[in-house]
Amino acid sequence: MGAPVGIIGLGIMGGAPLASSTAVAQQTEVIITSLPASAALNDAVAKISRAKPRIVIEMSTLPLADKERVRRRLASRMSAPTATARA
């Protein structure tokens, strides 16, 4: 079976798949997340926070309290201001 279409498209655009979300965070300045559940957000933040990303944009429609919790976690690892948008 061949590579998934998304992987092929990534290669055409000059990108390369990496082994983990931590590896991605180590190689980029901006991370955008849009996840289906708070548990997935917690897991992603645990992994990407090891890499000390510069900018994390969380786009999910999860409870604000969960987003605020991960914002505080990331803020303790980053040297930039953090904010949580309220709808």
Image (spheres, rainbow, N blue to C red):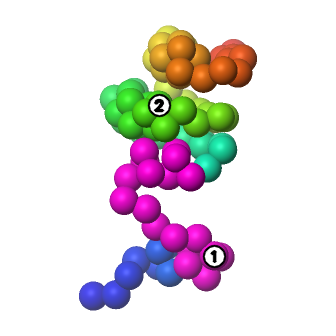
Residue visible at 52% across and 70% down in the picture: 16
- Amino acid type at circle 1 is Gly
- Front in this rendered view, residue 69 or 73: 73
Q: Which mark is residue 49?
A: 2
With respect to residue 36, does 23 lie above or below? below
Residue 15 x/y as whole percent = 58, 70
Residue 78 x/y as whole percent = 60, 23
Magenta residues?
A: 9-27
Residue ranking furthest to the left:
1
Query: In the rendered image, which quarter contains the N terminus?
Result: bottom left
With respect to residue 10, does 66 lie above or below? above
Secondary element type, mark 1: loop
- Front in this rendered view, residue 5 or 31: 31
Q: Is residue 47 visible?
A: yes
With respect to residue 77, does 13 lie above or below? below
Residue ranking furthest to the bottom:
1
Residue visible at 63% across and 76% down in the picture: 14
